[in-house]
């Protein structure tokens, strides 16, 4: 699979917009959002959520996605519910997006970086850590705000074995990478404590 470039992404968005039968919102996430926000790690596909105003037009919209992907020669992954890609659910009142661009009937938005980071922390591959370090630093996402959102998301998620893993991954990320992102004054204990309070769990020392 070849690496996706910003030119590839733009070509796909233009092609998709041209074939759309109705107004549609596309929410970029994953590695393709990292690419837009200044990430340098190669990614192989375009990850996004889709919001279609007219549910009866879904088959036509999906056909437009497939046709645009073929024409632009990109691999796509999409869903009508981004939370279904992850064991961790961001509370709806906390899930925010921001405008990126508009092309014809297509409105393209980005997940707010803190929300994007929750999904990256839930997966937590080496590539995700690289994206997180770059984007959080570049976008100046406040450490305590991210910690609280992670905690609220943990608390709101359906119970599963993956939630304990998510907790450990958040703790590990803050302890191992916090200073590289937020500087020498970053307080690991204070930030992890904020995560725990928001999650409604007892205080623990990160390893």
Image (cartoon, rainbow, N blue to C red):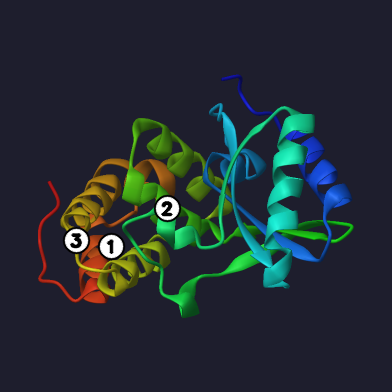
Looking at the image, residue 204 sits to the left or right of residue 175; the answer is left
Residue 11 in view in this figure: yes
In front of the other: 145 or 1? 1
Mark-to-mark CA distance, 3 and 2 = 14 Å
Mark-to-mark CA distance, 2 and 1 = 26 Å
Question: Residue 3 in the image: x percent, y percent?
Answer: 61, 23
Q: Residues within 10 Å of mark 2 (few under 14, many from 20)?
A: few
Task: Assign a secondary structure to mark 3.
Answer: loop
Which residue was labeled with disc 1?
191
Q: Tag 1 or tag 2, which sits nearer the N-term?
A: 2
Question: Residue 66 in the image: x percent, y percent?
Answer: 70, 41
Judged by depth in the image, the label closer to the viewer, 2 or 1, is 2
Which residue was labeled with disc 3?
160
| 21 relative to 151, above or below | above
Which residue was labeled with disc 2?
85
In front of the other: 96 or 46? 46
Q: Residue at point 33% right, 42% down?
A: 124
């Amino acid at each position: 699979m070849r690496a996706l470039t910003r030119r590839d992404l733009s070509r796909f968005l233009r092609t998709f917009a041209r074939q759309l039968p109705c107004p549609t919102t596309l929410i970029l996430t994953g590695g393709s959002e990292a690419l837009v926000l200044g990430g340098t790690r190669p990614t192989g596909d375009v990850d996004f959520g889709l919001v279609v105003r007219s549910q009866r037009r879904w088959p036509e919209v999906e056909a437009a996605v497939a046709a645009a992907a073929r024409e632009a020669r990109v691999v796509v992954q999409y869903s009508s519910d981004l939370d279904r890609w992850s064991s961790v659910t961001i509370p709806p009142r906390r899930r925010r997006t921001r405008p990126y661009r508009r092309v014809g009937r297509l409105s393209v938005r980005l997940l707010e970086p803190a929300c994007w980071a929750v999904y990256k922390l839930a997966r937590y591959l080496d590539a995700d850590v690289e994206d997180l370090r770059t984007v959080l630093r570049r976008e100046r996402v406040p450490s305590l705000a991210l910690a609280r959102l992670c905690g609220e998301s943990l608390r709101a998620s359906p119970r599963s074995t993956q939630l304990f893993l998510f907790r450990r991954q958040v703790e590990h990320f803050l302890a191992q990478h916090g200073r590289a992102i937020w500087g020498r004054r970053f307080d690991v204990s204070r930030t992890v404590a904020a995560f725990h309070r928001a999650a409604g769990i007892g205080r623990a020392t990160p390893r």
